[in-house]
Amino acid sequence: MRGIRLEGKKDSTLITWTIKHPQPPVKVRIPLHYLNGISVPCVQKGSKVRVGEKIASPKNDFSLALFASVSGEVTAIELFPHPVFGECEAVEIASNGRDEKITSLGQERPGWASLS
């Protein structure tokens, strides 16, 4: 059987790489509008949030709950540029750099197996 012969570079996998975890972004903007609906913010400007904390509730059956992707302080809930909608309301969070998570993040919820 013939095929393409590629040059072997197995020795490059022997390099000891130091993998560093990236720092959280300085600021994030989480849009409240998306194709299927709109979410309603449940935080206010000045609120302190942690990773995984709910920042917006669903407005109807077609919308979603939204959660913070960084820990820090909510600096604005206003219109920001958006690549699809041109402009849409978003929650802006300034990161505190600590990446603090809510205590229940990653824990198993009791009774989940009985859900149908």
Image (tube, rainbow, N blue to C red):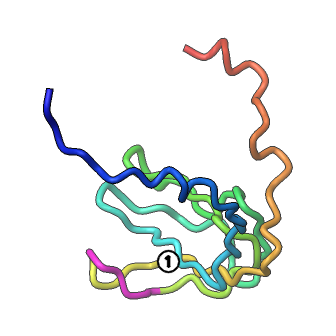
Which residue occupies the extreme right position in the image?
Answer: 103
Query: How far from the left and from the top, in percent, is residue 45?
Result: 69, 83
Magenta-colored stretch includes residue 80: yes
**Where's residue 59, x and y in %?**
47, 55
| Magenta extent | 79-84
Q: Residue at 68% across / 21% down in the picture?
A: 112
| Image quadrant containing the C terminus | top right
Give how far across and how far down residue 44 sits, in percent: 69, 77
Which quarter of the figure has residue 95? bottom right
Q: Secondary structure at mark 1?
A: strand
| Towards the viewer: 15 or 104 | 15
Residue at the spot 70% in from the left edge and 61% down from the top edge? 16
Q: Amino acid at mark 1?
A: Ala
Q: Residue furthest left?
A: 2
* Label 1 CA crowd tier, 10 Å (few <14, some 14–19, many 20+): many
Taking 73 as reference, is 8 above or below it? Answer: above
Residue 107, position in %: x, y?
Answer: 79, 36
Q: Nearer the viewer, residue 11 or 64?
A: 11
**Is residue 82 on the magenta stretch?**
yes
Seen from the viewer's position, the closer of residues 110 and 25 is 25
Kindly report the secondary structure that dominates the magenta region of the rendered protein. Answer: strand
Taking depth in this image into account, of 1 and 15 the one nearest to the observer is 1
Image vertical order of residue 38 relative to residue 86, above or below: above
Quarter of image, res 101: bottom right
> Dividing the image into 4 quarters, which one contains the N terminus?
top left
Residue 91 versus residue 21 in the image, above or below: below
Residue drawn at (48%, 61%) of the image:
39
Which residue, given by chain and number where applicable, does mark 1 sit on? Answer: 90
In this rendering, position of residue 62 left or right of residue 13: left
